[in-house]
Amino acid sequence: MFCRNKVGAERILWATDYPYCKPENSKMYLEKIKLPFEEKEKIAYLNAENLFGI
């Protein structure tokens, strides 16, 4: 929430510290955080798609 409030959801990319964090735990965190669905989509994959042109 701190990062989102400082720079906005449009400037955050979702990542994990694999192999130290399990991907399923990471997904749970993103699902439970209190953000609008549209912002979760941006953080989860839309920002990366836009950044990398995919």
Image (cartoon, helix red, strand yellow):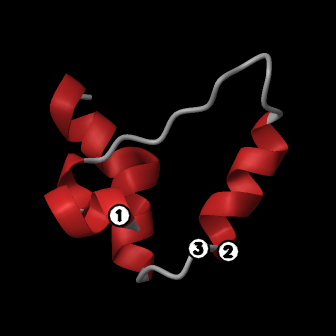
- Residue displayed at 79% across by 16% down: 19
Check disc 3: other Cα within 10 Å, few if <14, some if 14-19, many if 20+. Answer: few
Earlier along the polypeptide chain: callout 1 or callout 3?
Answer: 1
Q: Is residue 53 visible?
A: no
Distance from the alpha carbon under mark 1 to that under mark 3:
12 Å
Residue 20, relative to residue 15: is it above or below? above
Residue type, label 1: Phe
- The reply to whether callout 1 and callout 3 are in contact (CB within 8 Å) is no
Q: Secondary structure at mark 3?
A: loop
Distance from the alpha carbon under mark 1 to that under mark 2:
16 Å
Image quadrant containing the C terminus: top left
- 1 or 3: mark nearer the eye: 1
With 52 as the anchor, is 12 left or right in this view? right
Q: Position of residue 5 (x, y in %)?
A: 24, 69
Please name the residue that numbered disc 2 is placed on.
Answer: 32
Check disc 2: other Cα within 10 Å, few if <14, some if 14-19, many if 20+. Answer: few
Residue 4, relative to residue 23: is it above or below? below
Residue type, label 2: Lys
Q: Position of residue 17 (x, y in %)?
A: 65, 24
Please name the residue that numbered disc 1 is placed on.
Answer: 2
Please name the residue that numbered disc 3 is placed on.
Answer: 33
Q: Secondary structure at mark 1?
A: helix
Q: Secondary structure at mark 2?
A: helix
- Residue displayed at 19% across by 62% down: 6
Residue type, label 3: Ile
- The reply to whether callout 2 and callout 3 are in contact (CB within 8 Å) is yes
